[in-house]
Image: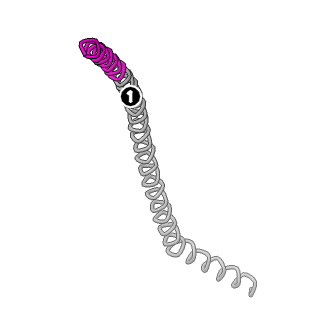
Amino acid sequence: EAAAAAADALGMARLSETNRELKRMLVALLGDDMAYRMETLAAEKAMYMLKADFLERKGEQDADVAERMRISCELWRCKYHAAMQSRAELAHWHEAVAVPHLRRMLACTQQLLLE
């Protein structure tokens, strides 16, 4: 019986050693997996930060372009209104000055032809 107890104790010691070794290997494996996941997450974070910076700069550039276009549109709108105002003033001047002058010239021409 002492031999069986010694064999059982030896078997238990080997089992305990095997279990300890398996635990160490599992911890190492999980540690490696966690380290890999942390590296992957850090790389993804860096990539997303670069992408966010790029999109932020692009957004600022697009806002600048939109502002310049708004100013350009406003400038052309003002030019259009100024041209319409000038056209209206020229039409008024034509009615006030040129048409009466042309009527007098026509009347004079008709009078000359009648003579």
For image coordinates 74% across by 87% down, the residue present is: 114
Occupied quadrant, residue 9 = top left
Residue 77 vs residue 90, the one in the foreground: 77
Residue at which label 1 appears: 37
Using the image as rendered, state which of residue 106 and residue 97 is in the foreground.
97
Residue appearing at x 57%, y 72% in the figure: 98
- Nearest the viewer among 86 and 114 is 86
User: Where's the C terminus, which quadrant?
Assistant: bottom right
Placement of the N terminus among the 4 image quadrants: top left
Q: Is residue 69 above or below residue 47?
A: below
23 in magenta? yes
Q: Residue 111, percent across and down?
A: 69, 84
Main secondary structure type of the part rendered in magenta: helix
| Magenta extent | 1-27
Please identify the quarter of the rendering in which residue 46 is found.
top left
**In x, y percent, where is residue 108?**
66, 80
Three-letter code, disc 1: Arg
Asked which secondary structure carries label 1, the reply is helix
Q: Position of residue 103 (x, y in %)?
A: 61, 80
Does 54 sit above or below residue 68?
Answer: above
The quarter of the picture where residue 17 lies is top left
